Amino acid sequence: MDDLDKTLDMMERDKCTTLLAENSVRLKKNNIRFTTADKKHSQEHLDAQQVSYEKLIRTLIRQLVGIEKKIRLKYLVPLENLRANNLRASWNTEVEGVLKDFKKKYRAVHKQRGSVEEFDKRVSQMLAGAKISVDTEVTKLKHKLETEIGTSEKFQPSELSKIYGVDEPVLVDLQIIDPLQDMRILFKKLEDSGCDGEVFVSLNEIIQMYAKEIRNVESTVWSGRSVDQRKETKMRVAKLSLNLKEIVLSLHDLARQALLEKEKRNEEIILKIRSNLEKLFKSVEDSEPLQNKLEPFWGVLN
């Protein structure tokens, strides 16, 4: 949990940096446009800059919520009260920093124009509105995550790791958590529609067997007598890992095709996937067991 929170903090910090940079670009463009038109620090110019800051705050809150939601749903991790409170404090601090920059750049201009009281009032309103928005969005996010995770049929990455014998960091690096989660849901739908459940057991076993082959090769890395031999083995592990990703994606696509009505299936895609899987299976010393595990699924697709 702590690791996930730290990862989210970094992602959100990066997003804030990006959005601040985008706002800076907008401000500069406005400065050029209004200076060229001999309207620098006109009311129209100042209004445009305020709109830019308002957009920054709205976008900031929306995208930070989006990051939390996407990652937590992916890993099926709810938003606990402590984290929710930390988010409120952190995001409010970000908003305060944005408005501090706004005041630093334009309060003196408003003072010269005699509109500083109105400016200060508007900044206070922006801050108050943003804090309400942050509190509302965090609360909504917490409830939404509780609902969606509570009713989710997806397996947590830690469960997928145990099922397939692939370390969780590898699942993340190969970006196969989503397709594996979705694939198991597709298998369940196919089984509910009348397909033999043993077919899908065999498909899962293909992934398990290939993952085991990778572990076997990986275990021999340090048995190499030379640096070149060890490097070659590591490269083979990397290649097999990429093959594993292709196998997962291919099986996922086949499951999606199987869910379609027969006349709506794309036979060309199915044949391409079949050919690709046969090539991938041949990357291991004994590919026949993998082929045998896949064979029953062709009956589902015929």
Image (cartoon, helix red, strand yellow):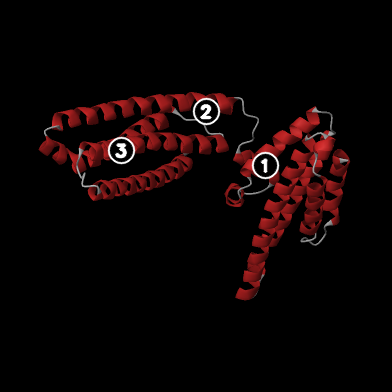
Q: Which residue is mark 2?
A: 145
The amino acid type, in three-letter code, at marker 1 is Leu
Indicate which disc, 1 or 2, sits on the residue closer to the N terminus: 2
Which of these two is toward me, 145 or 116? 116
Residue 89: % across, % down: 33, 32
Q: Nearer the viewer, residue 225 or 262?
A: 262
Q: What is the distance, in whole Å, between disc 3 and disc 1 at their CAs?
A: 41 Å
Q: Secondary structure at mark 1?
A: helix
Q: Earlier in the sequence, mark 2 or mark 3?
A: 3
Q: Name the residue beneath numbered marker 3.
A: 53
Q: Which residue is mark 1?
A: 180
Q: Please give left or right for residue 206 compared with residue 102 in the image.
A: right
Q: Residue furthest front?
A: 37
Q: Amino acid at mark 2?
A: Leu
Residue drawn 63% across the image and 75% down it: 228
Q: Residue 1 vs residue 160: left or right?
A: left
Q: Is residue 132 left or right of residue 35?
A: right
Q: Position of residue 206 (x, y in %)?
A: 77, 48
Residue 251 visible in image: yes
Front-lying residue, 265 or 39:
39
Q: How many marks?
A: 3
Q: Secondary structure at mark 3?
A: helix
Q: Is residue 126 left or right of residue 144?
A: left
The residue sitting at 11% across, 38% down in the picture is 112
Instruction: Estimate the spatial distance between the alpha carbons at disc 1 and disc 2, rounded to whole Å.
Output: 20 Å
- Asked if the residue under mark 1 is in contact with the one under mark 3, i.e. CB atoms within 8 Å, the reply is no
The amino acid type of the residue labelled 3 equals Tyr
Q: Nearer the viewer, mark 2 or mark 3?
A: 3
Instruction: Give me the C-alpha separation between circle 2 and circle 3.
Output: 29 Å
State which quadrant residue 256 falls in: top right
Disc 2 is placed on an element classified as helix
Q: Position of residue 27 (x, y in %)?
A: 29, 46
